[in-house]
């Protein structure tokens, strides 16, 4: 005979209580989505610079920390790398952090600075094609349109054409905004500027202390010839670099994919922000599990006589276990769809006010859905201990 869907009937028996329970579980699911969203944004913003490069390999210092604290390598190795048969092109990129003075209020803000060769740009930015000639002057900079409003745009919202020609200070040196570009900022700084290699050496604090700053660059971007694999190109470059002093450990040669993965790993594991959001996901799962356990345990206690009756007429503990786990799964399912919609709304609002893009992904939905089922299932399994007390003798 067809069995009565007891798990669903139990939830429909008291719809108001079930709704409150689903809201509690949904809160935990939203919390998971938000923490994973923040953690995902950490990884997305960490690779914004690498996303704009067109290269196969990256050569950088072994002392590299993160993209805006990359240390430096000697520019003198550029001709040597370019002469390798497997290499099609070598371009330089300078990266760092310094201070930006709000042209209206005079307040200082941390700003990311990116230096390129105006004649051979190393970043894929649409606006560069028309604005590159302006960067030939070292005091000219382009500012990211996504820089926060506290950097001082004239309209108080975002930098645009009205800000062209505005003068201010970077690292206490005079600069002029020559134009704007769009790339997006990250957690390292809420604003970014683009300028020439000469302009970078003029503004970067670490380069200002070096006597031969023009002879250093942050990293080299290598494009290989068609048909050459990253492994073959990397091996050829390491062999050539080893001839400098008998070792290649003075430089780090990575594929662009390895560089991006290393950058994400740095922000996930080696920085407080990544660790905090990672712990936040674990806490959300625990909170959701506790809420679900309280709901199921209370339901078991309220229905002990009914469960005892079922056992008296021959139903096994295994059947009752399936009922309780079914209720847990139904709670997770009822809470999940509204939680996804609420998370999408919160993602949109947070992205607008934080300036950091938080996107919903299918992987994240699948992960949170799986965690939700595990969370509620574990809570149901723990609540089974109370159900084992449901003996026929409890009826008398």
Image: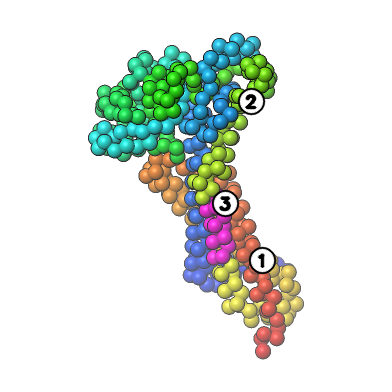
Which residues fall within the magenta stretch? 278-292
**Identity of the residue drawn at 44% across and 20% down:** 211
Helix, strand or loop at label 3? It is helix
Quote the CA–CA distance across marks 1 and 2.
Answer: 53 Å
- Residue 286 magenta-highlighted: yes
Quote the CA–CA distance across marks 3 and 1.
Answer: 19 Å
Q: Earlier in the sequence, mark 1 or mark 2?
A: 2
Dot in front, 1 or 2:
2
Q: Residues within 10 Å of mark 3 (few under 14, many from 20)?
A: many
Residue 317: % across, % down: 73, 72
- Coloring applied to the structure: rainbow
Quadrant assignment for the C terminus: bottom right
Q: Earlier in the sequence, mark 3 or mark 1?
A: 3
User: Which residue has dot 1 on it?
Assistant: 381
Main secondary structure of the magenta stretch: helix
Residue 18: % across, % down: 52, 68
Helix, strand or loop at label 1? It is helix
User: Which residue has dot 3 on it?
Assistant: 368
* The one of 31 and 49 positioned closer to us in this rendering: 49
**Identity of the residue drawn at 58% across and 35% down:** 262
Residue 202: % across, % down: 38, 22
**122 versus 383 height, above or below:** above
Helix, strand or loop at label 2? It is loop
> Quick check: 77 left or right of 311?
left
Residue 252 appears anywhere in the view: yes
Q: Which mark is residue 152?
A: none
**232 versus 292 height, above or below:** above
User: Which residue has dot 2 on it?
Assistant: 249
Whether pointer 3 and pointer 2 mark residues with C-beta atoms closer than 8 Å, the reply is no
Q: Residues within 10 Å of mark 2 (few under 14, many from 20)?
A: few
Dot in front, 3 or 2:
2
């Amino acid at each position: 005979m067809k069995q009565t869907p007891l798990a669903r009937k139990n939830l429909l028996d008291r719809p108001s209580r079930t709704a409150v329970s689903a809201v509690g579980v949904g809160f935990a699911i939203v919390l998971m989505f938000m923490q994973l969203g923040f953690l995902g944004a950490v990884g997305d913003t960490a690779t914004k610079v690498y996303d704009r490069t067109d290269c196969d390999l990256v050569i950088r210092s072994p002392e590299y920390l993160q993209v805006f604290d990359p240390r430096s390598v000697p520019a003198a190795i550029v001709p040597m790398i370019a002469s390798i048969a497997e290499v099609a092109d070598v371009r330089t990129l300078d990266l760092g952090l310094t201070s930006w003075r709000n042209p209206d209020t005079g307040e200082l803000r941390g700003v990311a600075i990116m230096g390129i060769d105006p004649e051979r740009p190393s970043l894929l930015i649409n606006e560069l094609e028309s604005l590159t000639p302006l960067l030939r002057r070292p005091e000219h900079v382009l500012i990211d349109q996504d820089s926060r409003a506290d950097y001082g745009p004239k309209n108080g919202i975002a930098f645009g054409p009205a800000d062209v020609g505005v003068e201010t200070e970077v690292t206490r040196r005079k600069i002029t905004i020559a134009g704007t570009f769009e790339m997006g900022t990250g957690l390292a700084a809420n604003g970014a500027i683009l300028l020439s290699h000469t302009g970078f050496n003029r503004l970067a604090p670490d380069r200002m202390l070096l006597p031969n700053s023009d002879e250093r660059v942050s990293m080299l971007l290598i494009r290989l010839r068609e048909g050459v694999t990253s492994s073959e190109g990397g091996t050829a470059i390491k062999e050539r670099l080893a001839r400098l002093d008998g070792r290649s450990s003075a430089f780090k040669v990575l594929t662009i994919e390895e560089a991006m993965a290393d950058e994400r790993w740095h922000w996930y594991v080696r920085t407080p922000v990544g660790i905090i959001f990672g712990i936040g996901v674990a806490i959300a799962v625990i909170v959701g599990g506790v809420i679900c356990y309280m709901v199921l345990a209370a339901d078991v206690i309220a229905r002990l006589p009914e469960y005892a009756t079922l056992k008296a007429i021959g139903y096994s503990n295994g059947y009752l276990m399936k009922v309780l786990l079914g209720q847990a799964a139904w709670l997770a399912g009822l809470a999940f769809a509204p939680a996804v919609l609420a998370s999408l709304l919160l993602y949109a609002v947070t992205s607008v006010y934080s300036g950091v893009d938080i996107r919903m992904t299918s992987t994240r939905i699948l992960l949170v859905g799986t965690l939700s089922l595990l969370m509620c299932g574990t809570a149901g399994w723990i609540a089974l201990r109370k159900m084992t007390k449901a003996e026929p003798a409890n009826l008398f």
